[in-house]
């Protein structure tokens, strides 16, 4: 009886199964049987043949050939505390290389507060924020940042580079479209890669070119409305561009955001703590309502003299990253002593707002003076603490310019002014970046020191170029 019932059930299965499925399953079964029974390999090699092949085998190197003169391989030895002055390779130099815009690396009050925190918590948390890595100072810093920026909530990352690189793919996914300024920094580019979205670059600081691209996208959306309904659109820009030192036209971008229903992400790594009467960044300087920006991110490694970064916005924006921001989830939390350094920096922001005017005045003075170079060309906004110097008379290729600028930097250090060649991974960048000397302004510099640096750089560049 059991056998008859089983036979009937099998027959019922075959009767109810489509023919194409039966044929496919049969072919798969034949393939599996063939693979199991088929003899593999063929004729076996003799021992002498095996030894010959082994002798002839030359494995590929683990690391390919690298230019020994590559700027990223030319390490400089710093032998002192980094501040307005720094000892580099044994030379005492005026420091125009470190991103220490407000001079907080030399602030004894911030240092003492960080040391107190070190004695209380130790060096590090040894865990991500979700796994015993959250301490009260982290929550205090997030509350302080949100209140300072006048927004609902903030989230702190332990590494500046990973902040915007984690924030972008936390929201943008495959099938979305991201409109991006072509000169965005490398960390933004890595965030774009991780998002797997369709990336559309517009000309640097050209709102009209962006509008042209948005209009073209609007025409495509009309042809395929079903796809358009599912496609989200993002706009990613920097407040001050690391690669150019120029300010973004934020009011124009906000207007386009409203018109074309974009989600706007703004990276204020340089502009936070440098622009505006209270250091709140380009939104304060250009009087743009921060509620118009969907997400504001910034590194704390410039104006705040610590490490890490943060994102600030609505409650949803911050809370979503606690589950989706890879740099937040999988990285050990920001060391408590450096978290306290950021809190102490915010204290100074609120207590001494005049420091921002001092920095902006000095940045303008540097800009006016450095426009006078005969062999170098200045690029950057007058208020930006980051400026670039290019070879005024362009050479045949970027490699030649890079070597010339490296010589200028070397000789400047030997003579007492620390400048650094901006380093790029040219084969990984969205587009080749022209070599430059990147100048970082420090609020503690005096006018006389700026003039001294100008004369020395002018002398060296005239000699080399």
Image (tube, rainbow, N blue to C red):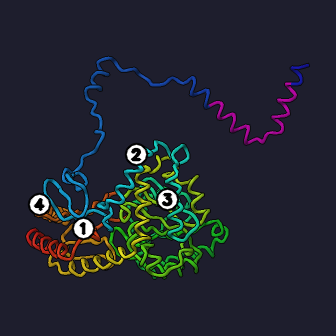
For mark 3, give the secondary structure: helix
Callout 3: few (<14), some (14-19), or many (20+) C-alpha neighbours within 10 Å?
Answer: many
Quarter of the view holding residue 277: bottom left
Instruction: Name the residue tied to disc 1.
Output: 436
User: CA–CA distance between discs 2 and 4?
Assistant: 39 Å
Q: Earlier in the sequence, mark 3 or mark 2?
A: 2
Describe the element under mark 4 as helix, strand or loop: helix
Q: Residue at x 19, y 66 (%)?
A: 401
Disc 4 from disc 3: Cα separation: 41 Å
Which residue does the image show at 23% across and 71% down from the upper left?
445
* Element at label 1: loop
Which of discs 4 and 1 lies nearer the camera? The answer is 4
- Taking the spot 42% from the left edge, 43% from the top edge, the residue there is 122
Of residue 48 and residue 173, the one placed in the foreground of this image is 173
Q: Quadrant of residue 394?
A: bottom left
Q: For marks 3 and 2, give the one nearer the viewer.
A: 2
User: Which is closer to the viewer, label 4 or label 3?
Assistant: 3
Between 462 and 442, which is closer to the camera in this rendering?
442
The 10 Å Cα crowd at callout 1, few under 14, some 14 to 19, many 20 or more, is many
| Residue 141, numbered circle | 3
Is label 2 in a helix, a strand or a loop?
Answer: helix
Dots 3, 1 in contact, CB < 8 A: no
Q: Which residue is mark 2?
A: 119
Q: CA distance from mark 3 to mark 2?
A: 19 Å
**Distance of mark 2 from mark 1, alpha carbons?**
42 Å
**Mark 2 and 4 residues: CB-CB less than 8 Å, in contact?**
no
Density class for disc 2 (Cα within 10 Å; few <14, some 14-19, many ≥20) is few
Vertical comparison of 9 with 246: above or below: above
**Which residue in the protein does label 4 denote?**
414
């Amino acid at each position: 009886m059991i056998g008859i019932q089983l036979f009937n059930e099998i027959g019922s299965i075959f009767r109810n199964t489509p023919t194409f499925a039966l044929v496919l399953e049969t072919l798969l079964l034949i393939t599996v049987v063939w693979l199991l029974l088929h003899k593999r390999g063929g004729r076996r090699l003799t021992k002498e043949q095996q030894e010959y092949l082994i002798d002839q085998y030359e494995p590929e190197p683990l690391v390919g050939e690298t230019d020994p003169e590559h700027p990223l391989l030319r390490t400089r030895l710093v032998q002192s505390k980094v501040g307005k002055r720094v000892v580099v390779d044994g030379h005492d130099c005026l420091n125009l290389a470190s991103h220490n815009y407000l001079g907080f690396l030399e602030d004894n009050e911030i240092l003492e507060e960080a040391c107190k925190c070190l004695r209380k918590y130790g060096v590090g948390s040894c865990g991500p924020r979700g796994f015993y890595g959250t301490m009260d100072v982290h929550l205090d810093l997030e509350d302080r940042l949100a209140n300072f920026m006048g927004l609902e909530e903030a989230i702190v990352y332990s590494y500046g580079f990973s902040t915007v690189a984690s924030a972008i793919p936390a929201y943008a996914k495959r099938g979305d479209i991201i409109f991006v300024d072509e000169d965005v920094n490398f960390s933004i580019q890595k965030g774009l890669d991780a998002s797997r979205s369709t990336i559309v670059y517009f000309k640097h600081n050209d709102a009209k070119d962006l509008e042209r691209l948005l209009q073209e996208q609007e025409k495509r959306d009309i042809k395929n409305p079903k796809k358009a309904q599912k496609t989200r659109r993002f706009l990613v820009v920097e407040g001050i561009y690391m690669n150019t030192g120029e300010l973004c036209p934020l009011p124009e971008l906000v207007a386009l955001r409203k018109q074309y229903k974009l989600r706007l992400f703004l990276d204020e790594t340089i502009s936070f703590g440098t622009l505006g009467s209270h250091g709140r960044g380009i939104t304060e300087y250009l009087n743009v309502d921060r509620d118009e920006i969907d997400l504001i991110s910034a590194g704390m490694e410039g104006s705040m003299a610590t490490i890490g970064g943060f994102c600030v916005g609505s409650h949803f924006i911050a809370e979503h990253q606690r589950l989706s921001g890879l740099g937040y989830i999988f990285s050990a939390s920001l060391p408590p002593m450096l978290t306290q350094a950021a809190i102490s920096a915010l204290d100074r922001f609120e207590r001494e707002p005049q420091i921002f005017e001092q920095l902006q005045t000095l940045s303008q003075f540097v800009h006016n003076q450095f426009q006078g170079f005969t062999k170098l060309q200045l690029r950057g906004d007058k208020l930006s603490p980051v400026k670039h110097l290019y070879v005024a008379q362009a050479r045949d290729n970027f490699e030649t310019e890079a070597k010339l600028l490296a010589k200028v930097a070397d000789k400047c250090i030997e003579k007492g002014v620390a400048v650094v060649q901006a380093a790029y991974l040219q084969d990984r960048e969205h587009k080749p970046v022209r070599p430059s000397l990147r100048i970082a302004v420090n609020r503690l510099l005096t006018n006389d020191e700026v003039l001294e640096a100008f004369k020395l750089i002018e002398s060296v560049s005239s000699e080399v170029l």
